[in-house]
Amino acid sequence: MPIVFGSSCGECFAIMSCDLSEAVINRSKNAGLRISHQGVNCMADYKPISRRPIAGAFRRTAEAATRLCVHWGIHPDAVSYFSILAALGGAFCFWRSHAAPWLLIIAPMFCYLRLWFNMLDGMVAIAADKVSGRGEIVNDLPDRISDIVIFVGVAHSGWMNPILGYWAAIFAVLTAYVGISGQAVGVQREFNGWMSKPWRMVALHVGAWTTLACWWWNDQSIRLQSLTIFDWTCIVVIAGCVQTIGTRLKRIMAALERRTK
């Protein structure tokens, strides 16, 4: 009874020349393995453990791009890396915006483009049947890099105290880390809280355009109680991240407690 083992895209498989007994098939089905007339796939097709809830309207903006990526064979990992390029574009615009304030109009658009690419990579992976554990890492790591890059660009924009920008970057990464921790300990990944990734970008958008409006139409006055608008923006981001971290930790601990009962 020859057995051939091999691998394809991280999956191991076995092809057996003999017919599978009913008992083997039943045991394999109970274990969640894929059964076919050709043999047993010793690892079930990878399924994403958790997916970020995304508004349907926003998701629909990427449907055509998803089809094109699949048609052209663009790998979802490449789309993930494009999100870093978008973040670098946003960071550059923030960094140079004090010398050219009109860049504050463009910078938030790069932040949203970063979010769009981060959504697109998952949609392409699913549509092209390239979902994998490695893909989840490649999806998340560029996201953390993007958060840091964008807030560092804001910190050195000349519109604020750089220390607050760096603290916003630190708390953004901590917020994501806590959310992933739930998945790491075997319960759900958490996306709840006031200052999740999309809302951090929205906060920067509001801060950027408010700063520009005050610069152009309020005699270049961008301060409120000795702090600049971007200072207050990062304070809001930090406070929101603290609330988000607390919310996520509470939900993760509750899930762990339910699992042990």
Image (cartoon, rainbow, N blue to C red):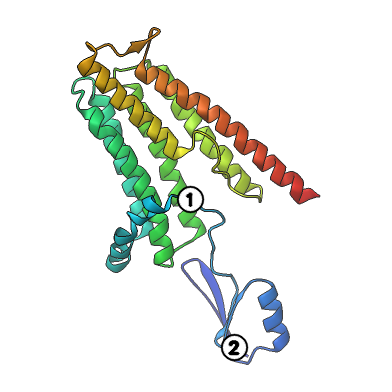
Residue 214 on image: x %, y %: 26, 17
In the image, taking residue 193 as reference, residue 147 lies left or right, namely left
- Whether residue 190 is visible here, answered yes or no, is yes
Q: At 38% across and 60% down in the image, what residue appears?
A: 124
Q: Look at 58% across and 47% down and name the residue there.
A: 189
Q: The disc labelled 1 sits on which kind of residue?
A: Ile
Q: Position of residue 246 (x, y in %)?
A: 61, 32
Q: Amino acid at mark 2?
A: Pro
Q: Which mark is residue 183?
A: none
Residue at image location 48% in from the left, 50% down from the top: 137
In contact (CB < 8 Å): disc 2 and disc 1: no
Q: Mark 1: which secondary structure?
A: helix
**N-term-proximal mark, 2 vs 1:** 2
Label 1 sits on residue? 137
Q: Position of residue 111 (x, y in %)?
A: 33, 38
> Which residue, as the protein is rendered here, is positioned at the far right?
261
Compared to 28, does 125 lie above or below? above
- CA gap, disc 2 and disc 1: 37 Å
The N terminus: image quadrant:
bottom right
128 left or right of 181 in image: left
Nearest-to-viewer mark from 2 and 1: 1
Q: Quadrant of residue 70?
A: bottom left
Give the label on residue 2, or none.
Answer: 2
**Whether residue 74 can be seen here:** no
State the residue in front, 129 or 63: 63
Q: Secondary structure at mark 2?
A: loop
Neighbour tally class for label 1: few under 14, some 14-19, many 20 plus, Cα within 10 Å: few
x, y percentage for residue 184? 62, 47
Q: Quadrant of residue 13?
A: bottom right
